[in-house]
Image (spheres, grey):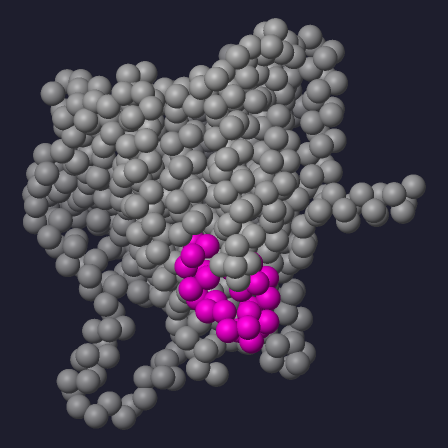
Amino acid sequence: MIPEQKELKPSAKSPLTFIKRKLIEYAVPLLFLVLCIIGAYYARLQPAFLINEIIMRMARNPVLVLALIIPVVAGMGMNFAIVLGAMAGQIGLIIITHYEVTGIVGLSVAAFIAVPFAVLFGYLTGKLLNRAKGKEMITSMIFGFFAVYVWQLFFLVFVGSIIPMRNEKMILSTGVGVRNTVDLVGIRYALDDIIKIRDLPGINIPISTLIVVVLFCILITFFMKTKLGQDIRAVGQNMEIAAISGINVDKIRITAIILSTVLAAWGQIIWLQNIGTLNTYGSHVQVGLFAVAALLIGGASVAKANIWQVLLGTFLFHTLFIISPTAGRNLLGDAQIGEFFRVFVAYGVIAVALVLHAWQKHSAAKNK
Amino acid sequence: MKNFIDLAYNKIGLPRLIITIFLLVFLIAAAVVDLSIPMLTGSLLVRVGMNAVLVLALIPAIKAGTGLNLALPLGIMCGLVGAVIAIEYKLAGATSFAVALAIAIPLAIIVGYLYGLVLNRIKGQEMIVGTYVGFSVVSGMCIFWLLAPFKNPEMVWAYGGTGLRNTILLHSSFDKILNNFLGFKIGEIEIPTGLLLFFGLLCFLVWLFGKTRTGNAMHVAGSNPRFALSCGINIDQMRILGTVLSTVLACIGILVYCQSYGFLQLYQGPLMMAFPAAAAILIGGASPKKAAISHVIIGTFLFQSLLVVAPPVINVLVEGSFSEVFRGIVSNGVILYALATRWEGGE
């Protein structure tokens, strides 16, 4: 998505320096590739199972990661507040489950209902982040936490008491509050099953969902070439210069966050139609963490990201996710180690990326 | 009237104002629904004491100019390691607490120093980096708790497994060791004398440090780096000092917290602990750039009294347990407020 980086001058003197430079550029994905290979070796999973899991995750997860790109390009860092987008998607799903609209129609209606909520949430996030320039990431993260609690308050207390909702399958027996899990049986696999290849034993390929993912990738690439996309990039490179050249910086930044939030809403819907059950108070909580970790593992930084990094990162992160419990059990005799390890990887990779980025920025500022 | 509101707003600050109003409303409601005030007061005193040291730990970092230290879990981990080692050797009573401190503090100094080195290279991004450094250390330590070769059956999973339990009882080591020290009762109110004295002592030490030459230099480095430079103060060194002190206080803070709570919480337990502490000091009137010990005391008191009074009152109105939700909304809301405004703090 980002055209050839300018700092990669064509004057690479020898192929050796070229290889060295490429190695440094792809150090993070390479490291995780090695980790994945070692893990896969020790996990000894059935190849068909592993491939099937990877394909499934490559269909259901990338849109949530794609949602992060636009704010990164806009210079706002990782938008941890995509949690709010996920919530908007879940609101859509809760409403269609309540009215028992099923199948791909239900899914489309949910995606449609989610949009106004996502736009509203994105607008609020954008407004907030404009007040916290330079501290966008911490602010979006805390806003995500805040929203998780407001969500709990809303769906535990207000639904059923203030907002009428009577579907017994979803509401707690007291009549107030949504159940911990909502069965999404009506829309389960609604997108995956439109076109699905089942010819290989043990492997299902949800072609339709993969097509949607590719479509979103193309759309984002295309979008970044439009006037609005160029404005977003200009704001990301330098807010002051963008403002001087007549761009309404605050508005562009809000637009970037709104787009990110809407994408996250759709991403969450795609993800949940594959999972099949909504964990009312848990499904959205880790969305930001896992998406950000995946993007960074793909080789992106807080200031630079493209769709290839999204796809590569999703692939590596989720492969690690699949293999680490079994690898942990086979290597150290405890599956929990693998689970702890993957959580540690998610947090750790974010911490390291943040440190490296802030370090670079700090030393760049110092050299001036 | 408008002048009065402006004055209140500027002097007290919006967070403190709102929380105080909230608290008053809940107190009136508590009186209406007939909650036992002595019992609430007793548990309030305990909760203020057990949480206050963790809030106090934020002071040196703010003074040194590194903002809210959301990497408190670094110090917390050191404290827990100290506690676990003390229990492993089956120490009891005051000895176990002292040994835990003696192991934890040197660890915290090393960890704080290393983290301070990191912070000097990422100026301006301390909060987000601190958050994720804290998160990754907590989740990395999960693997340690699982693999570390501890043997004491009180801490290891019962059924022949390896690895420490999620919660470790302290009844044979330092459960309530501070709370019960010189503890007495006024009517139905239990006074955790030792706990409050210990907190008072730490406050005094922090205050005393602020009066020393070094403490003053650290404050200058944090509040006015240019002036500090012209005075020949090594700013980076002062930032490291602030971080070390903050980490050490955090490790003491978690031990104080645990002895009052009666359990150690390992694994994911300490993951989010920095946020309520940060919220408390902000409620007390501090800002990420300015803080005093009075902010710690006022903030912890206001925040904890809200947390003590509000849930039982809310539970009368609606069913279910909302203390967690309530705490989450208040603490994150306050931090958001501090981030999104250029609030300089109250007095």
Residue at x-position 63% and y-position 41%: B294
Residue B281 vertical position relative to residue A124 in the rendered view, above or below: above
Where is residue B93 shown, x and y percent of the image? 31, 20
Residue at x-position 46% and y-position 69%: B234
Residue B231: within the magenta?
yes
Q: Is residue B173 visible?
A: yes
Q: Would residue B110 appear left or right of A86 to someone viewing this image? A: left
Residue A120 vertical position relative to residue B20 in the rendered view, above or below: below
Find residue B26 and report its image quarter: top right
Instruction: Please tell me whether the stretch drawn in magenta is mainly helix, strand or loop.
Output: helix
Q: Nearer the viewer, residue B262 or B330?
A: B262
Q: Is residue A76 visible?
A: no
Find residue A295 and report its image quarter: bottom left
Q: Nearer the viewer, residue B98 or A260?
A: B98
Q: Nearer the viewer, residue A275 or A83?
A: A83
How many discs appear? 0
Residue at x-position 39% and y-position 72%: A360
Find residue B33 and report its image quarter: top right
Question: In the image, which residues are magenta?
Answer: B218-243
Where is residue B214 shown, x and y percent of the image? 49, 59
Image quarter where the N terminus of chain B lies is top right
Residue B195: within the magenta?
no
Where is residue A236 shown, x and y percent of the image? 52, 71
Where is residue A219 shown, x and y percent of the image? 45, 64
Q: Would residue B280 appear left or right of A8 to someone viewing this image? A: right
Q: Nearer the viewer, residue B48 or A335?
A: B48
Residue at x-position 23% and y-position 67%: A27
